[in-house]
Amino acid sequence: IIGGVVPVQTTTYYVKATSADNCESEVQEIVLTVYPKPTLNSSLALTICSGDVFSYTATSAMSGVSFVWSRAAVSGISNPVRTNVNGPTINETLINTTNAPVIIAYSIEMIANGCSKSETVYVTVNPKPGLSNDPGTITICSGTAYTYLTPTSNVSSATISWESLSVNGIAEGMANGTSSINEVLTNTTANPVMVTYQFTLQADGCTNTQTVSVMVNPSPELSSALYLSPI
């Protein structure tokens, strides 16, 4: 069709030919069918926590759409590149190896009726908070204080709470708090007893739990008689 016409919907054209001596042909009807390009109607922006499964199903308002998706390798994300994966479903466990949110872009190509279009889905992967000053398992003597000053996290915005779990053989009951730990632990047995503190860390909708263990050794006591008969 002369003139560079670009129809945006199905259009009927009526065409006739005229010769140099002004002879005209019969009018011909030409129907030009215009298919719309497919678009995503599923979400284009999502947020998950590191270590969680990103589960996404691409959908379109059009029927008969086929999908192909790809994702580049991203600095701070341990997952390798994925290219030209057929199908609408994405299922990946995404690992953020940094202490800050990382954004991943998925390119999704849609094909229908010979027409194609690509759109991008952005996924923010927030880091899971963890203890950055984990003291590991330490050992103390019965009757002395276990001190863990100011637990901190690799994620600066994290809130931290803790609780000690009740243990047979330790005189002190359960305790909890949101800052430093400083409590006396008394072993009422003749054997070492392990006390476990559970920490809950939360940041940007992500939660993680960690434990810190304390071995409480019993105080030594004489097993021989303390009073002897006169001799």
Image (cartoon, rainbow, N blue to C red):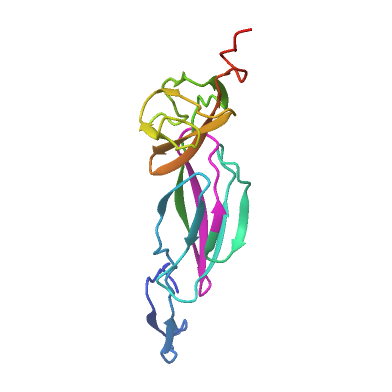
Magenta span covers which residues? 91-117
Residue 34 position in % (x across, y down): 43, 75
Q: Nearer the viewer, residue 229 or 211?
A: 229
Magenta-span inclusion, residue 48:
no
Return the residue found at the far front: 231
Residue depicted at 51% across the width and 35% down the height: 211
Left or right: residue 116 compared with residue 3: right
Left or right: residue 84 compared with residue 41: right
Return the residue found at the far bottom: 26
Return the residue found at the far top: 231
120, above or below 203, in the image: below
Q: In the rendered image, which quarter contains the C terminus?
A: top right
Residue 14 position in % (x across, y down): 39, 84
Counting every numbered tag in the picture gives 0
Q: Nearer the viewer, residue 178 or 94?
A: 178
Q: Nearer the viewer, residue 72 or 128?
A: 128
Camera sees residue 160: no
